[in-house]
Image (cartoon, rainbow, N blue to C red):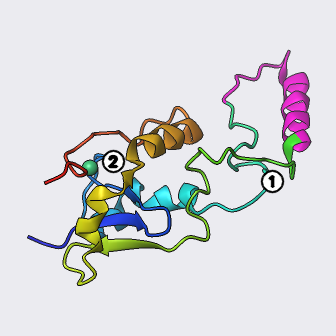
């Protein structure tokens, strides 16, 4: 029971399936779980990068000792400053920013548009999204997504 939602891009005829992200499909589940944050990558729009951004300097966990601290910090700061505001062309094959400016909706299966069912024939980008999401998020397993292919795009 309950209404299920899929993220749908009407212009590109693409879909992100919540179950393929190993998540739940109800609006509350989209809202309260990390899968709801996928829109940050999909809708990102910028031609440049900076700290904490896609393509920006990666967060690094480095053990500083009294011997390497000054040198390592200077190195990290220089590395970060060198990338700040730099051009960051993202290949069109990437999912990062791919939905920016498009007609995008989280469509429920009770919606009269029929889009939810129609999306079965759309391109499911869930697997690629999980791969790029996890590369961006890094090693923090609590923030990573898991690709769990379901039968959502099988034809009936
Ligand atoms: Zn699926």
Residue shown at 34%/39% (left/top)?
147
* Residue stretch rendered in magenta on the structure: 61-82
Outermost residue on the left side: it is 1
Residue 105 lies, with reference to residue 112, above or below; the image says above
Element carrying mark 1: loop
Residue 28 lies, with reference to residue 145, above or below; the image says below
Residue 69 lies, with reference to residue 41, above or below; the image says above
Element carrying mark 2: loop
**From where the camera sits, is residue 143 visible?**
no
Residue 71 lies, with reference to residue 138, above or below; the image says above
- What percent of the width, then of the height, locates residue 155? 18, 51
Q: In which quarter of the image is residue 64?
A: top right
Residue shown at 13%/54% (left/top)?
156
Specify whether 52 is left or right of 155. Answer: right
- What percent of the width, then of the height, locates residue 118? 27, 66
Which part of the image, by quadrant, shows the N terminus?
bottom left
The circle drawn on residue 26 is none
Q: Residue under label 2, please give it.
A: 21
The circle drawn on residue 48 is 1
| 64 in the magenta segment | yes
| 47 in the magenta segment | no
- What percent of the width, then of the height, locates residue 50? 79, 50
Camera-side residue: 115 or 35?
Answer: 115
Camera-side residue: 123 or 36?
Answer: 123
Label 1, label 2: how far apart the Cα atoms are: 28 Å
Q: How many marks?
A: 2
Task: Report the magenta stretch's main SS.
Answer: helix
């Amino acid at each position: 029971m309950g209404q299920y939602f899929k993220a749908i891009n009407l212009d590109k005829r693409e879909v992100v399936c919540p179950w393929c992200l190993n998540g739940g499909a109800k609006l509350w589940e989209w809202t309260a779980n990390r899968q709801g944050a996928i829109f940050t990558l999909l809708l990102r729009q910028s031609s440049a990068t900076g700290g904490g951004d896609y393509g920006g300097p990666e967060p690094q966990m480095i053990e500083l000792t009294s011997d390497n601290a000054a040198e390592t910090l200077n190195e990290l700061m220089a590395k970060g400053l060198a990338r700040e505001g730099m051009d960051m062309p993202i290949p069109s094959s990437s999912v990062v920013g791919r939905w920016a400016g498009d007609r995008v909706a989280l469509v429920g299966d009770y919606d009269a548009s029929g889009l939810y069912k129609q999306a079965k024939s759309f391109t499911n980008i869930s697997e690629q999204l999980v791969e790029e999401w996890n590369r961006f998020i890094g090693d923090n397993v609590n923030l990573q997504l898991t690709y769990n292919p379901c039968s959502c795009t099988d034809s009936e």
